[in-house]
Amino acid sequence: MDTVSWAAHRRAVVHTVKRRVPFVDPEAAASRGLATLCARIVADGAVDRPADIWCEAAVDAAFAMLREMILAASRQVRPATADDMPGADA
């Protein structure tokens, strides 16, 4: 595949991630997916349909990023203020 084809695939992968997994950075997910594809090629040699594998890996990476965001948000503790108390505006 030439560079132009890979650039077109990247745009498609980013678009797919953006559509399937909102609230995550689709560019970062596409990069993680590409890293997964490269690791698979190193381990297994040539693969059939690398663009499909890249897209699937990017979506999986996006879901992992979303889980990381949810877990990080659930760990954040915000101290209570007087405004949080019932009747504080009275």
Image (cartoon, helix red, strand yellow):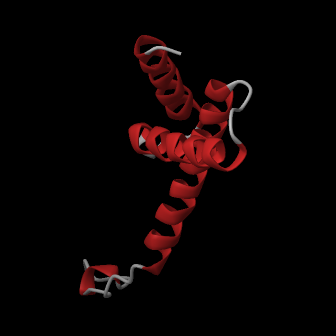
Query: Could you tell whether 56 is left or right of 61 in the image?
Result: right
Count of numbered badges drawn on the protein: 0
Left or right position of 86 against 22: left
Instruction: Kindly identify the residue that appears in the image at 41 percent across and 17 percent down.
Output: 3
Q: Give the vertical position of 30 relative to 72 (above or below).
A: above
Query: Residue 89 falls in which quadrant of the image?
Result: bottom left
Q: Position of residue 72 (x, y in %)?
A: 45, 72
**Residue occupying the point 27% across, 79% down:** 83
Q: Position of residue 65 (x, y in %)?
A: 51, 56
| Pick the front one: 86 or 66 | 66
Tell me what residue is drawn at x 47 percent, y 20 percent.
6
Horizontal arrangement in the rendering, residue 3 relative to residue 88 (left or right): right
**Closest to the observer, 41 or 53:** 41
The C terminus - image quarter: bottom left
Horizontal and vertical percent for residue 10? 46, 25
Residue ID at (61%, 32%)? 55
Quarter holding residue 53? top right
Task: List x then y, in percent, for residue 24.
Answer: 45, 46
Residue situated in front as seen by the camera: 87 or 68: 68
